[in-house]
Amino acid sequence: MSHGPSAPAHAHGHGGEAAPYVPVFTEGSARRRELDDLISRYPSRRAALLPALWMVQQDRGWISEDAMREVGEQLDCTAAYVKGVVTFYTMYHQHPVGRHFIQVCTTSPCLCAGADDVVKAFLEHTGCKELGLTSPDGKYTVIEVECLGACGFATPVQINEDYVECVTPEKVPGLLAALGD
Ligand code: FES
């Protein structure tokens, strides 16, 4: 899980944080109760870090520096520690992404089977200018990732939490249409 996407640091899309940061785990909120319940099941507060980050991402679409600070305060660890975890796992987004986050395996076996053409088809049909950049309508972000563990079913693509195997360029328009908004 340590493989990194090729998302450039300047990637941008919907949901930027120009407005003042609004905490996720406000006192008395459902998310705070959920987090407190989780923490009660772990030996230390920081042990709840991964699910806490997941909650942030579910609610906000990505994990900002402000959110990292908030999570750190909630779990008694530094923002730097939280950032170290966020940057390790590709499943956490450090910048806003499209509503449909598309990850295409381009490791050697899939490359040999045509993964490059699948990437090109996704970029062309989503309107994303390049890998890691969100489409102008805010719907899509496409990135390359290392082995998705489905090497016998090239080219595998992960779209949000779903896996799709044996994707070819010809299948891309249909796949995107099935995603809806
Ligand atoms: S190399 Fe593509 S899934 Fe393993």
Image (spheres, helix red, strand yellow):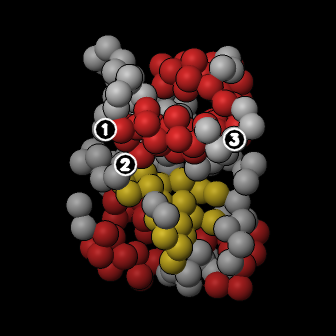
Query: For this rendering, which residue is in front, 152 or 79?
Result: 79
Q: Residue at x 34, y 59 (%)?
A: 126
What kind of element bears circle 3?
Answer: loop
Q: Amino acid at mark 1?
A: His
Q: Amino acid at mark 2?
A: Gly
The residue lying furthest to the top in this view is 20
Q: Which residue is mark 3?
A: 42
Number of on-image labels: 3
* Distance from the alpha carbon under mark 2 to that under mark 1: 7 Å
Rendered image: mark on residue 14: 1
Q: Amino acid at mark 3?
A: Tyr
Residues at marks 2 and 1 touching, judged by CB atoms closer than 8 Å? yes
Q: Is residue 73 above or below residue 114?
A: above
Q: Are marks 3 and 2 in contact (CB under 8 Å)?
A: no
Residue contact at pointers 3 and 1, CB within 8 angstroms: no
State the residue at coordinates (43%, 32%). 32
Q: Which mark is residue 135?
A: none
Left or right: residue 107 compared with residue 161:
right
- Residue at position x 42%, y 28% from top? 25
Q: Tell me the number on the disc at residue 98.
A: 2
Q: Dot 2: what SS?
A: loop
